[in-house]
Amino acid sequence: MTRETVFFVDDEEHLRIASAQSFELAGISAECFESADACLAAMADGFDGVLVTDIRMPGMDGVGLLHVALERDPELPVILVTGHGDVDLAVRCIKEGAYDFLEKPCEPARLVACVERAFEKRRLMLENRELRAQVGSDNSVEALLNGRSAAISEVRRMVASVAATEADVLITGATGTGKERAARALHKASARAGGPFVLINCAALPDALIESELFGHEAGAFPGATRARFGKFEHARGGVLCLDEIDSLPLELQAKLLHVLQNRTITRLGSNDQVPLDIRVVALAKGALEGAVAAGTFRADLLYRLNVVTIDMPELATRREDIPGLFTLLTAEAAAKYGLAVPEAPAGMLSELSSRDWPGNVRELRNEAERFVLGFVAESEHAELTLAEQMAHHERALISAAIAAHKGSLKDTHEALGLSRKTLYDKMQRYGLTKDDFVQDA
């Protein structure tokens, strides 16, 4: 069934013909039926479109059709066409779940406009339904790295590709971009999915404990070591060891890590025996490590050993088209976390969220979703926008994302967007954008 299809039901043939012509001229796929029974039979295999029905018809009337259709799908947009003074009845039907009603005689333009608005609502609802279905589902690459933008699609492609190998991986990206989620996705997609995923934040451990945490120790290795203890490397055997903020490792431990990566063995503190390891190492860093190498705080040979495969996580500002879907998914996750009903974010709110810069990336968006679920963000703060305002917000967001993706190069940007240079300049001036806002410091 085509998602962009309207089912039109009316027992008067001339109205069916006229409406079908109106839909065809507007580029809307339509199927017309003379009775509720015929329409319901066509819906038997599921229907993802919009329903428009007359109220007064022989047999099952439009109100009966509304109730049956909403039993099958409570979120189906149903538009009632009313005559014979049935406006009060139509208003009652809206309280029972109808999307809207139109009075006869109905101007073709009003009918088409009403259906197009219903399609907008339907598309958003279907996307939300798909995203919410992922909450509580398996930790697949698609579920952990959600979005439809080219940037996150490329990350998923790289994760799926490298997951089939045993190569160690370096994942870089700004705070909140989802580096840990990418590491977990890699683990879940690999042959090691049945093994452990051991995460350690190198920056959160005191220098005095980090060596013991990673390599383990024997009894008596240092004061207080009353018994032998496995380190994180051994706990990760058969699985993945994820080292977050690897650039925080002291230089002497970087040398030992390099030995582990090269030989796949460790030596516990207080021991001379080498312990063989079957692990995969995934390292996370906030930015490119070349700068740390130049500063003398990170070993060049360790970087060369790690960056055989490097995955760079994109910032949220470079994939604004993913924000509405991500916010919906994060809202559902937050509602499940707190045991609350999932609130529906209005279109105006989603459009406004898409226009923000989000310096904290997905982590900041997650916090906003939790605040929304808990009632600390009022929907009134994101008033419904007109279609023109929503289009402007969306256009500004797309242009901003394109400039950021091309690192401020306006030539590359206008070519990628299919705009003339002058048109791009005019739009940037209208939205208060300058290329300097998107040029990253060296």
Image (cartoon, grey):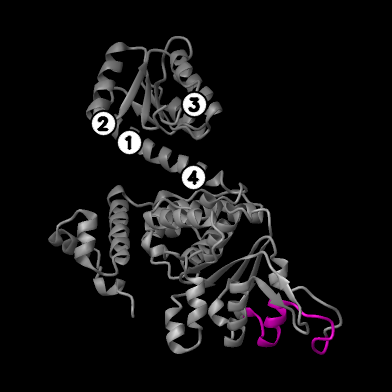
Q: Earlier in the sequence, mark 4 or mark 3?
A: 3
Q: Circle 3 is placed at which residue position? A: 46
- Name the residue type under label 3: Gly
Cβ atoms under marks 4 and 2 closer than 8 Å = no
Q: Are marks 3 and 2 in contact (CB under 8 Å)?
A: no
SS of the residue at dot 4? helix
Crowding at dot 4, Cα within 10 Å, few <14 / some 14-19 / many 20+, comes out as many
How far separated are the C-alphas under marks 4 and 1?
18 Å
Which residue lies at the image location 48% right of the left edge and 20% below the top edge? 65
Cβ atoms under marks 4 and 1 closer than 8 Å: no
Name the residue tied to disc 2.
27
Which sits earlier in the primary sequence, circle 1 or circle 3?
A: 3
What is the distance, in whole Å, between disc 3 and disc 2 at their CAs? 22 Å
Label 1 – label 3 distance at C-alpha? 20 Å
What is the number of the mark on residue 116? 1
Where 31 sits versus 416, above or below? above
Q: Earlier in the sequence, mark 3 or mark 2?
A: 2
Q: Residues within 10 Å of mark 1 (few under 14, many from 20)?
A: some
CA gap between label 2 and label 1 equals: 11 Å
Identify the secondary structure beneath mark 1.
helix
Q: Which residue is mark 4?
A: 128
Q: The magenta stretch spans which residues?
A: 204-224
Looking at the image, the residue that sits furthest to the right is: 226
Mark in front: 2 vs 1:
2
